[in-house]
Image (spheres, rainbow, N blue to C red):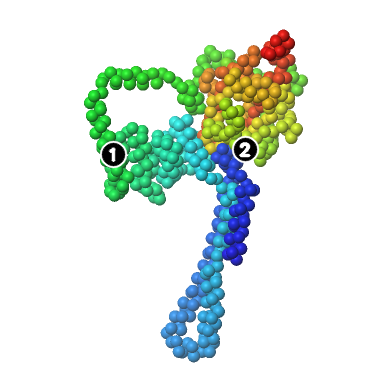
Amino acid sequence: MAFNKICYIVALGFLLPFSYAHTDFFTSIGHMTDLINTEKDLVVSLKDYIKAEESKLEQIKKWAEKLDQLTDTATKDPEGFLGHPVNAFKLMKRLNTEWGELENLVLKDMSDGFISNMTIQRQFFPNDEDQTGAAKALLRLQDTYNLDTDTLSRGNLPGVKHKSFLTAEDCFELGKIAYTEADYYHTELWMEQALKQLDEGEVSSADKVYILDYLSYAVYQQGDLSKAVMLTKRLLELDPEHQRANGNMKYFEYIMAKEKEANKSSTESEDQAEKETEVKKKDYLPERRKYEMLCRGEGLKMTPRRQKRLFCRYYDGNRNPRYILGPVKQEDEWDKPRIVRFLDIISDEEIETVKELAKPRLRRATISNPITGALETAHYRISKSAWLSGYESPVVSRINTRIQDLTGLDVSTAEELQVANYGVGGQYEPHFDFARKDEPDAFKELGTGNRIATWLFYMSDVSAGGATVFPEVGASVWPKKGTAVFWYNLFPSGEGDYSTRHAACPVLVGNKWVSNKWLHERGQEFRRPLLLFLFCIQFMLNKVHPAL
């Protein structure tokens, strides 16, 4: 029996790598929902195992109670007890047969079903990369949304339905992952949180000595020598023989002595220069900071005067026959670049159909390497995507037609409908949809020119975070289920509009589904007049100077 089980598990372990490939669970909440069902199945299997063990123990308990009473009586008068021939026979029977049966019952392994199920389900488990990816997502959310460790640890996030908290051991794990990435800033934050929760009396397997060891080194790496010394002293109070801490203390004291001497020779002019540099740093606002501010809903640059020029309207697609009698609701989101939102433009039924078609095909989203042109995954794009063609489903075909009718652009040269689902802290940092001049071959294989415009459907509401932001102009567009936004990536001249550089903010709470259509230049010559003019000019130049 045991040999057969071992053979089964070995065979299964050999076959699984060929039947299943890891799918980067942390990059898609949609795929992570499958893990909930996997865990539920394991819990059911575990409870069955517990019931089987309890049943076995109950049988053993009854046997023990029965024999306890019997042996109590027998030992008080052994000869008299055995003088009864039935008692003598039953003693022989018990010791020769029944105790052997009890031994078999005790030795019976009730875990077979659970272990077999565990072996099968293990193929669907996340791996170290997923755990690290999810941990980094928490750190990213902490930075983007200015969350302190205590708030995040206690699960006090906006819009949460199922509140959860981090234990001291969880905080320690986050700190360790940050440490392995040489991210000493977050190592300090999370090791301090773990220490705080232990100091407050939380019962945990996390060890203060280990936490202080990581924490003191992380603090030292950030240049706070006095704090590193203080933490190391606290560690040595708990474990005076700690070899590394004793070595570190001697080294820290040596460095402090050297710094004390160096500080004596420092001049006031250097202090002044430092202050000037600090002022310059405050004045300079890099894209990353602008992006994070917009994700938080801060720093919007739209003036009241400009806001008055934004309108909402009923739109018929420039007298499109399909929408003359039933125009759609449209509102201006931004003026330059012009971003418009269409309301109630995709139904819940259509959304569910698109999601059902896409979910089995979702794969880790990639970016195009600007040097090699090869598709590759990137830490700044955390999502999974799938591509749907119009011929696959009448719903997708209908959606494509709707985009063509309302934009006035030909979708026959557009890319397929891309469906994306974001993962834990899912995001896509600032990027352009169109190809720049230094990427002339970006869409060469398609043969349809550059991406002239972007149409983006929001297929879910997001409880917190997940905005589409445009750092160059200060615009934030928030997800709203059933709506879509549209903007041109190229000017009528065909030049790229650099103000359309945009990003998908990390999802703080919720599950974000979107789908988008990238429309290309070819086919729009008679739909955007200046493009026809430029096309004719290019055609004439090629006639006169073929090399052009």
Outermost residue, right direction? Answer: 321
Element type at mark 2: strand
Of tags 2 and 1, which is closer to the observer?
1
Element type at mark 1: helix
Taking 140 as reference, is 235 above or below it?
A: below
How crowded pointer 1 is (Cα within 10 Å; few <14, some 14-19, many 20+) is rated as few
Across and down, in percent, residue 541 comes to 70, 10
Quadrant for residue 246, please give it. Answer: top left
Q: Which residue is mark 2?
A: 363
Which residue appears at 54% of the width and 76% of the height?
100
Across and down, in percent, residue 457 comes to 64, 28
Disc 2 residue type (three-letter): Arg
Which residue appears at 51% of the width and 43% of the height?
131
Q: Which residue is mark 1?
A: 251
Across and down, in percent, residue 188 comes to 38, 37
Q: Nearer the viewer, residue 182 or 543?
A: 543
Which residue appears at 61% of the width and 48% of the height?
17
Residue 362 in view, yes or no: yes
Taking 464 as reference, is 111 above or below it?
A: below
Q: Nearer the viewer, residue 331 or 376?
A: 376
How crowded pointer 2 is (Cα within 10 Å; few <14, some 14-19, many 20+) is rated as many
Q: Nearer the viewer, residue 367 or 391?
A: 367
Q: CA distance from mark 2 to mark 1?
A: 49 Å
